[in-house]
Amino acid sequence: MIKTIVSTELPVDEQFRIRKNVIQHGRKDGLRFCVVTGTHGDELEGQMVCYELARIVGEHPDLLCGTLEIYPALNPLGIDTIQRGIPNFDLDMNRIFPGDPQGTMAEQTAHAIIEDIKGADMVIDIHSSNLYLRETPQVRINIQNAEWLMPFAERLGMDFIWVHDAATVLEATLAHSLNSTGTPCLVVEMGVGQRINHKMCRRLVEGILHLMMRMGMWKGSVSADLPKPIVCKGDHVAFLNAETSGVFLTELKCGINVSRGQTIGQIVNPLRGRVLSNVISPTDGYLFTIRAYPIVYEGSLMARIFRSEK
C-alpha cells in the first residue's frame, strides 16, 4: 500500500510529496521495520535496495510477520535534479532534523518524517558516499548508542562497523533524532555518489532480510553465513590527506588490508609528466575509504584506514 506522508503545494501548480510503501502481514500490532533513503539526492544506492526489498517481500507477503515500510525518497526534489541538498534552499536535509512543525517547508517536512517513522522497532538509514569518495559497505554508529545498536549492526552482514564520536555533527541528522526518541536507527554507508553498485546493494538487501529474520519478522530463506564485520573505534582511524594539488592515480579499491609504507596512489602533474607526491599508508590496517574523484587539492581527503597494528 502506497501512503503519502508529506504533501505540499509548489509554485506553478506542482506538488511536493514524500511517499512510502507499506507491506503488512500478520498482526497489525506486530514489529515494524523501516528502510529509508534518498535524504541526499546524489546518493542512489538506496534506490536499488528499496526496489529489491519491495519486490521480494511484495511477491511473498505471507513470509512477512509484521510491517515493512519503505521510504525511497526523503528528498525527492534532490533526486529529480541530482542535487545533494534540497534545491532552491541550499540546504542539507540531513542537518535539519527533527524539524519544526511551524518552520519552513523543509523544517515542516523533516518534522513530518520523524513523526511518521518514530516508534519503529528498527530503522535502516541508507546512504552512499559523495562523488569524491568510495566507501566499503559499513554501518556507522555514534559511540553514545554503541552498546544498544551493536547487536543489530553485527547482523546486517556489512564489512565494517565504525563507532565514532562526532556527536556535534550528528545532532541534526535523521539517525540521531530517531535514536534520541528511543527508535533504533542504523546508518549504512557504501559505494560512491551518483552510481549504483549492484553487488553492494544485493548484500545489504540480504543483510536486511537476515536482520528481519533474527527479529522474527521474515520467514523466507536468507544466507546462512554472513561475514563477521570489522569493528572500529573512531580514534583508531588514520586520515590521509593530499600534500599537494594534482591528479590522483591509484590501482587500489577500498575493502582491502594495507601495510605501513605501502603506496596507496600517486598525485601527478599531467602537464610535466611528474609525480608530485606519493600517498603512503602510515599504518597496517583496513582501507575502508578511498578517493574516487581524481582531481585533488592540498588537504583533500584521500583515504581512511582502520589501524590494526599494535
Image (cartoon, rainbow, N blue to C red):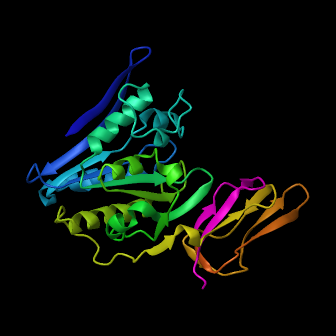
The quadrant where residue 306 appears: bottom right
**Image-based side of 172 in relation to 202, left or right:** right
Residue at 38% across / 65% down in the picture? 203
Residue at 19% across / 48% down in the picture? 23
Residue at 34% across / 30% down in the picture? 17
Q: Position of residue 229 (x, y in %)?
A: 43, 74
1 or 245: nearer the viewer = 245
Magenta segment includes 289: yes
The quadrant where residue 7 appears: top left
**Image-based side of 26 in relation to 13, left or right:** left
Magenta segment includes 173: no
Q: Position of residue 201 (x, y in %)?
A: 41, 59
Q: Is residue 213 above or below residue 41?
A: below
Residue at 47% across / 58% down in the picture? 189
The quarter of the image holding the C terminus is: bottom right
* Residue 236 visible to the viewer: yes
Q: Position of residue 205 (x, y in %)?
A: 34, 61
The quarter of the image holding the N terminus is: top left
Q: Position of residue 80 (x, y in %)?
A: 47, 34
- Furthest toward the left, the residue is 27
**Image-based side of 263 in relation to 219, left or right:** right
Q: Is residue 258 above or below residue 174?
A: below
Q: Is residue 52 above or below residue 38?
A: below
- Furthest toward the top, the residue is 12
- Furthest toward the right, the residue is 272
Magenta residues? Answer: 288-310
